[in-house]
Image (spheres, grey):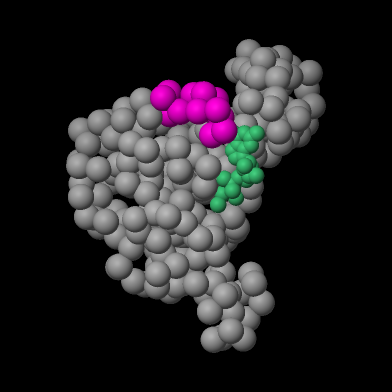
Amino acid sequence: MFVLVIGPAASGKTSISNQLSKNGFLINLDPATSSNAPIDIRKWVKVEDIQKKYNLGINGALLKSMEIISGINEWIYEDRNKIKIVDTPGQLEIFLYHEYGKKIVEKMLKHDIVTSLFIIDAQEILSLENYLAILAQNAMINLKLMIPSITAINKIDVVDVERIKKFIDRKNIEKEFERGDALISLSKGLIDYVEYTSIYQRPIFVSAKTGEGIYDLYSVIHEVHCSCGDLS
Ligand SMILES: Nc1nc2c(ncn2[C@@H]2O[C@H](COP(=O)(O)OP(=O)(O)O)[C@@H](O)[C@H]2O)c(=O)[nH]1
Ligand SMILES: [Mg+2]
């Protein structure tokens, strides 16, 4: 199975990928960041070279890089018995607004099953509204990619986890709905949608720094692996 690690810039995708790759095979698909991964896309596509070659700014060069990556096969690792952790660039836009993300997923699907692992920075969950906004992004990506999705809340070593658990608690959310706030009411459908499209409704709390929760994340990845395996 491929585990496509996505999420906003600096949420901890690379740190989590490194942790998970202790028991998996690491593929770096970020053309802008050097990596010790056994498969490193920078062997074929380096964002700074693309920038020069096509005379592009950094964002244009990253998009061009992803277009090239979606068209080559060199980074695919064939072993179906291995969990392949795929680290991706910081720009979530690639998966939200462009076809390259979808093409990359389709390429992987030709070789093995794929799940996404959406990483959220716990420090960004400051309110229920804030959490719902992040979930909306997750839902949009799920809608676009059409693969199972796992959500991990990272950096729990630097936040009050109990406070965050209150925001994401279904009963608490329902209470907020009852208050009648229009925006929150609108998001009720969103929560139902996310729960419908995610195999795992509950996010996994982790710290890539301390390793806390990484074992739980492995368990969930293996469960998705088994359930998808049963379906195929
Ligand atoms: N405190 C803390 N910092 C983290 C954790 N995971 C990542 N970071 C830090 O967050 C920053 C971004 O991490 P990185 O893995 O590069 O994020 P990416 O851009 O999503 O790949 C770095 O400074 C990391 O050291 C964590 O669990 N706890
Ligand atoms: Mg990274």
The quadrant the C terminus occupies is top left
Q: Quadrant of the N terminus?
A: top left
Q: Position of residue 48 (x, y in %)?
A: 57, 75
Q: Position of residue 156 (x, y in %)?
A: 62, 26
Residue 8 visible in the snapshot: no
Q: Which residues are magenta?
A: 201-217
- The image shows residue 196, relative to residue 24, as above or below, that is above
**Secondary structure predominantly adopted by residues drawn in magenta:** loop
Query: Which residue is painted at 78% across and 22% down in the image?
Result: 180
Nearer to the camera, 202 or 66: 66
Where is residue 141 shown, x and y percent of the image?
52, 48
Whether residue 122 can be seen here: yes
Q: Is residue 223 above or below residue 64?
A: above
**Residue at position x 54%, y 72% from top?**
47
Kindly indicate the quadrant of the structure image that contains residue 54. Answer: bottom right
Q: Residue at x 41, y 25 (%)?
A: 215
Residue 203 sits inside the magenta stretch: yes
